[in-house]
Amino acid sequence: MADPSFFVGVIGNIISILMFLSPVPTFWRMIKKKSTEEFSSFPYICTLLNSSLWTYYGTIKAGEYLVATVNGFGIVVETIYILLFLIYAPPKMRVKTAILAGILDVLILVAAVVTTQLALGGEARSGAVGIMGAALNILMYGSPLAVMKTVVKTKSVEYLPFLLSFFFFLNGGVWLLYAVLVRDSILGVPNGTGFVLGAIQLVLHGIYRNGKQSKHVSNKLEEGWQHEHLISSSTTRSHDRENLPI
């Protein structure tokens, strides 16, 4: 009889792939306009680091190849997004994007790999990498908290995209189930957090779905996926927010 965790992991991979591909309309818009407009590259850079760490985790921990494969796909997709940013961004943003990508996606990643390879081994190594990936995931899942406060205050879900909430709930739930089946607490904690927060967001959508909304802003938020709303509220004042699965 086939292992049920394999089928759950495959479903999780499919959902995660859809999340990785969700920003495609945003980048198609950039290509047509030959401009990055007000979008920020920072969330894509963070998602690339997150995907890289989880790919590394999946390759060094036995039985976690499904985690490695989907995040390997994420590395390819996020790299393409960043390259498009470098092509269409204004000169100052292009330089800033290159510097941030170099620091986060090259230097920090290389430092994490080299350090864990030289200083740690076995479960300690995979555990350290998993904790780093989990921390980034929790940051991603917790990013809409400030927006949720705004939703309650304004009684409108205008600034909380439904797709963001739905995918957080679905992705978190499936990967939580997978983590339970394979008994991987490091994978379970961040996705359990995402599942709960996603559920709360869906409840808020149910309560305030008839609130007055600005059609222009709502469409822009939906089109921009979570990459416009990935970073915390303090960062949002200077950057659009947006990602990343597992």
Image (spheres, rainbow, N blue to C red):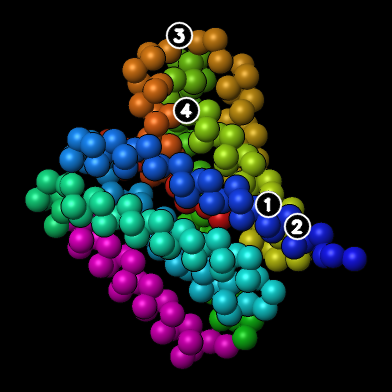
Q: Give the crowd class for mark 2: few <14, some 14-19, many >=20 residues within 10 Å.
A: few
Nearer the N terminus, badge 3 or badge 2?
2
Q: Between marks 2 and 4, how big is the CA–CA gap?
A: 31 Å
Foreground mark, 3 or 2, reads 2
Q: Residue at x 75, y 62 (%)?
A: 6
Could you tell whether 20 is left or right of 172 in the image? left
Residue shown at the point (25%, 60%) measured from the top left: 100
Q: Are marks 1 and 2 in contact (CB under 8 Å)?
A: yes
Q: Are the residues at dot 1 and dot 3 in contact (C-beta closer than 8 Å)?
A: no
* Tags 3 and 2 touching, CB below 8 Å: no
Hey, what amino acid is under mark 4?
Leu
Relative to 228, say whether 218 is above or below: above
Name the residue beneath numbered marker 2.
7
- Looking at the image, tell me whether mark 4 or mark 1 is earlier in sequence order: 1
Could you give the CA–CA distance between mark 4 and mark 3, rounded to whole angstroms? Answer: 13 Å
The residues colored magenta run: 96-121
- Quick one: label 1 or label 3, which is nearer the N terminus? 1
Magenta segment's dominant SS is helix
Amino acid type, mark 2? Phe
Does the residue at mark 2 contact the one at mark 4 (Cβ under 8 Å)? Answer: no
Element on which disc 3 rests: loop
